[in-house]
């Protein structure tokens, strides 16, 4: 009885337990017409706001028995079926999505206006359509002509890429049901509205209700749906934050719109991890994948400049070498200034305090500016050592050794603390021609040398200063 391996919900394990498939259905409370998605007006009787959600038959979860009592059943009896994912032909995007697109899943691609969201989803739709599948692009913000011009700029436009210039959610749902594409794109959620609901497109109610109706439609049709959402730096507008719990996957597109690199970061994924990032470069013909980000991020490095340090960081499973730049200048204001771009300000304040108290640098008189090159956000504490040394190098006006990378978390006593994946970081540094990498002396030490890059263990910032010839 308890050996339930291989049992499925359709094979009841207990008497009285009834497990059926169910599906969200919308029923008109006036005429009884049923729909798979929510509509503001019943298409049969014309009544407004008459649709109510009901549980139908056909889905993958347990339903209460007719007596109204719900029954729990062993979780192991649920068949572990691996979802067949829709292949994503753009490698960097597939990496972030954890393989491909799960049928019926809703992906939100969020980012500031002008960052390149429409370009990326158009490239995705185009690449999927090029493999013979039907892709449908709902253009609610731009005209079909504008999207057509952009698509041509990106390359040949496949015949199975359909465009629907429409902002009424009801009409979009109807078109999706009629076409049943392999993937649908809605650009953007702030530009569509449910006619039967109050408010302007972009208002919180409209954004939330439009997304809910579109998500229901995607799940019913078992079709992956990508929704675009704009955010501003202040997060002031109704947008993706309202939607995050409604969708399965949330991707953020980051980067400086005045620079070429774009990072796609996953912050929520019901079907995989959230640690991977995808790196792209905006070119005259769309976003190009950057399979070797370290090389791209170090391309413009001024070797021998003071205030520059290379951090050996990890982004998900991928080691990445990134340049950290620091500038210090004598402060003429009452209060010293600290700014950080691509690094958490709170951590920079902590590091400057440690440099002042533990290493004797005159931080109290210096303004400090830190910038991470390439638009990347260094969130890992392992980047501390590179940031601390970049600031020290700038303050002391002495360059760090050009062929050395840095990794380690810095503690309040000025100690360099252990971090994971040292071998992989050294391997990447060696691949890019770095001869040495300062690593924490505590924890598990890597091999003395990996791919030609020597591991130089240091216990503290003082030891790091000595190893780099700063003191
Ligand atoms: P877009 O995808 O429209 O941004 P979003 O949808 O996030 O608002 O792209 C914005 C910028 O990208 C725009 O300034 C023009 C630029 N761009 C290129 O540089 N090359 C290209 O091939 C394309 C299509 C756009
Ligand atoms: Mg756009």
Image (cartoon, rainbow, N blue to C red):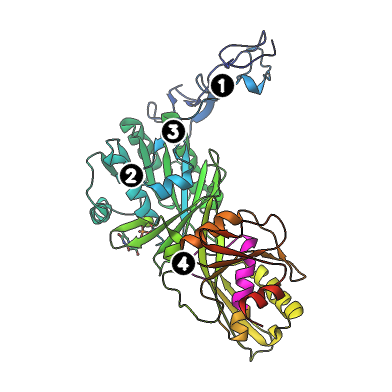
Which quadrant of the figure contains the C terminus? bottom right
In the depicted structure, whether residue 50 falls above or below residue 155: above
State the separation of the CA atoms marked 1 and 2. 32 Å
- Name the residue: 64% across, 75% down: 467
Label number found at residue 374:
4
Residues at circles 2 and 3 in contact by the CB criterion of under 8 Å = no
Between disc 1 and disc 4, whose residue precedes?
1
State the separation of the CA atoms marked 3 and 4. 34 Å
Magenta-highlighted residues: 372-391
Read off the residue under disc 2.
Answer: 125
- Name the residue: 27% across, 36% down: 132
Q: At numbered mark 3, what does the secondary structure look like: helix, strand or loop?
A: loop
Read off the residue under disc 3.
Answer: 103
Q: Whole-percent x and y of residue 57?
A: 51, 18
Read off the residue under disc 1.
Answer: 79
The one nearer the camera, 137 or 400, is 400
Which quadrant of the figure contains the N terminus? top right
State the separation of the CA atoms marked 3 and 1. 17 Å
Between disc 3 and disc 4, whose residue precedes?
3
State the separation of the CA atoms marked 4 and 2. 27 Å
Residues at circles 1 and 2 in contact by the CB criterion of under 8 Å = no
Quadrant in which residue 73 is drawn:
top right
């Amino acid at each position: 009885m308890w050996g339930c391996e291989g049992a499925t919900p359709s094979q009841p394990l207990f008497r009285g337990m009834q497990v059926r498939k169910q599906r969200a259905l919308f029923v008109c409370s006036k005429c009884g017409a049923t729909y798979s998605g929510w509509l503001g007006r019943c298409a049969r009787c014309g009544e407004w706001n008459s649709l109510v959600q009901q549980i139908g038959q056909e889905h993958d979860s347990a339903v209460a028995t007719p007596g109204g009592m719900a029954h729990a059943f062993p979780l192991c009896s649920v068949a572990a079926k691996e979802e067949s994912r829709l292949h994503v032909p753009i490698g960097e995007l597939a990496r972030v999505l954890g393989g491909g697109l799960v049928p019926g899943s809703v992906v939100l691609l969020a980012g500031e206006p002008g960052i390149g969201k429409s370009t990326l989803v158009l490239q995705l739709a185009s690449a999927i359509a090029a493999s013979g599948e039907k892709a449908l692009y709902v253009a609610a913000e731009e005209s079909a002509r504008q999207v057509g011009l952009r698509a041509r700029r990106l390359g040949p436009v496949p015949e199975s890429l359909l465009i629907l210039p429409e902002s009424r959610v009801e009409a979009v749902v109807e078109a999706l049901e009629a076409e049943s594409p392999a993937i649908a794109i809605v650009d953007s959620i702030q530009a569509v509205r449910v006619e039967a609901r109050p408010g302007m497109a972009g208002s919180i109610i409209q954004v939330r209700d439009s997304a809910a109706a579109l998500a229901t439609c995607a799940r019913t049709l078992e079709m992956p749906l990508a929704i675009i959402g704009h955010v501003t730096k202040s997060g002031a507008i109704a947008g993706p934050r309202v939607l995050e719990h409604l969708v399965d996957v949330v991707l953020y597109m980051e980067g400086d719109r005045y620079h070429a690199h774009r990072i796609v970061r996953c912050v929520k994924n019901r079907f995989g991890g959230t640690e991977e990032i995808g790196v792209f470069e905006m070119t005259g013909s769309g976003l190009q994948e950057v399979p070797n980000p370290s090389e791209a991020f170090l391309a413009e490095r001024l070797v021998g400049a003071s205030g520059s340090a290379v951090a050996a960081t990890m982004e998900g499973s991928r080691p990445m070498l990134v340049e950290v730049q620091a500038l210090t200048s004598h402060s003429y204001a009452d209060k010293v200034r600290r700014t950080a771009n691509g690094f958490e300000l709170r951590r920079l304040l902590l590091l400057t305090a440690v440099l002042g108290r533990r290493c004797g640098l005159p931080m109290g008189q210096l303004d400090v500016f830190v910038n991470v090159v390439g638009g990347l956000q260094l969130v890992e504490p392992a980047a501390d050592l590179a940031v601390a040394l970049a600031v020290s190098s700038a303050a002391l006006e002495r360059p760090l050794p050009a062929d050395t990378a840095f990794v380690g978390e810095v503690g309040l006593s000025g100690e360099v603390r252990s971090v994971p994946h040292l071998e992989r970081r050294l391997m990447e540094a060696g691949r890019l021609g770095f001869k040495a990498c300062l690593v924490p002396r505590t924890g598990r030490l890597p091999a003395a040398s990996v791919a030609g890059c020597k591991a130089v263990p240091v216990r503290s910032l003082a030891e790091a200063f000595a190893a780099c010839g700063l003191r």
